Amino acid sequence: MKRFSWTALLPVILAFLVPTAAVIALRPGPAALPAADPGPVIRVYRAATHSVTPMPLEDYVAGVVAAEMPANFHMEALKAQAVAARTNAVRILAYPGRATGGADITDDHTRDQAFLSPDDLRRRWGSQFTAKFDRIQQAVRGTAGQILVYGGQPIDATFFSTSNGYTASAQEVWGKNLPYLQSVPSPWDASVAPRFQDTKTVSIKDLAAALHLTAVPATPGGSLIQVLGESPTHRITQLRVGDRVVSGNDFRTALGLNSTSFTWTISGGEVTFRTTGYGHGVGMSQYGAEALARQGKTAKEILQYYYRGTQVVPWSKTLVLAAAKRPNP
């Protein structure tokens, strides 16, 4: 998700805040807005139809939670996901018209957050729609208006599926040193995540094509791929592949690997990769959140574990106006 300068927020505050006769005072703790308050309107670009759909923020949050996390997860994990999704939406609302077609945000999970409408979910869930969507809505209502802040400002609440035992810092993955996106242990993923470890086999020919190699060793053996850099969380940061040096993230993307935490073997013209974890690794591990919820942790405890030094507070005019006066986190 992209970062922004909070000075850009002031021109659009009146455009997306729900009118109210009084300014809500910023209070400590996770107090929520009334369940009936739908929040500001957010315009979502739907890639499949190339259209922009305006909707209340809380409806958008429900669509993100449904798209990003299994509906049968523990309620506290779903609540944590709802707060993270809402936080990201509030940050992104500071970019009026930055998304395609004049929207505030897209449903592209690689750029913003995945989103599914109730109609999308009916097609996906069929006869289970009512039961599953009721759980999603319960999580959203149970956290209505709550966002994560650091230093009084909404954070970049990144999340991913499954860690390799540790989350990664924003610095090691994206080169951004954010105090609330530091590496933390997440050993619980191994016990609950179905894709904690996975394998993928590709031919050397396909690997060379994916990475646009101009030269491949005639007898590659172990010399085809060489690790040049590895992070403290055991994620590969840089490799030499044939005649190219690539980042771990670019390598993972080009080959469609689950993570940058991997080993490999080469045999008979093929490379078999064994990955650990799923996703970029920064922020909240969704399966880690599920494991912590099963242990009795609340959504707030889960969020404050993965996003260190943050607070869960009610989203309000006072919060946004105050944040606009501070430097970007």
Image: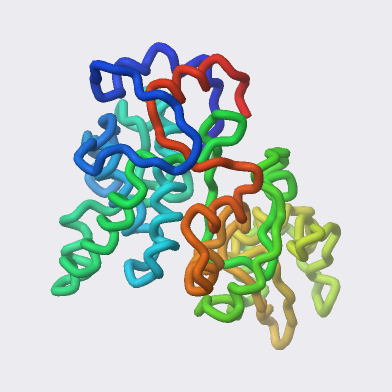
Colour logic:
rainbow
Quadrant in which residue 253 is drawn: bottom right
184 to 10, vertically: above or below: below
Identify the residue at image location x=24%, y=43%.
Answer: 35
From the top left corner, tell me how far across and down residue 166 is, in percent. 69, 64
Front residue (pair 294, 272)? 294
Quadrant where the C terminus lies?
Answer: top right
19 to 73, vertically: above or below: above
Quadrant in which residue 248 is drawn: bottom right
From the top left corner, tell me how far across and down residue 153 is, in percent. 54, 29
Identify the residue at image location x=73%, y=57%.
Answer: 214
5 to 151, vertically: above or below: above
43 left or right of 201 in image:
left
From the top left corner, tell me how far across and down residue 90 is, in percent. 42, 33
Front residue (pair 86, 110)? 86
Identify the residue at image location x=70%, y=64%.
Answer: 185
Identify the residue at the far bottom of this view. 268
Identify the residue at the far top of this view. 11
Identify the residue at image location x=43%, y=47%.
Answer: 83
Front residue (pair 137, 11)? 137
294 left or right of 70 in image:
right
- Total marks in image: 0
Front residue (pair 11, 289)? 289
From the top left corner, tell me how far across and down residue 258 is, in percent. 58, 67
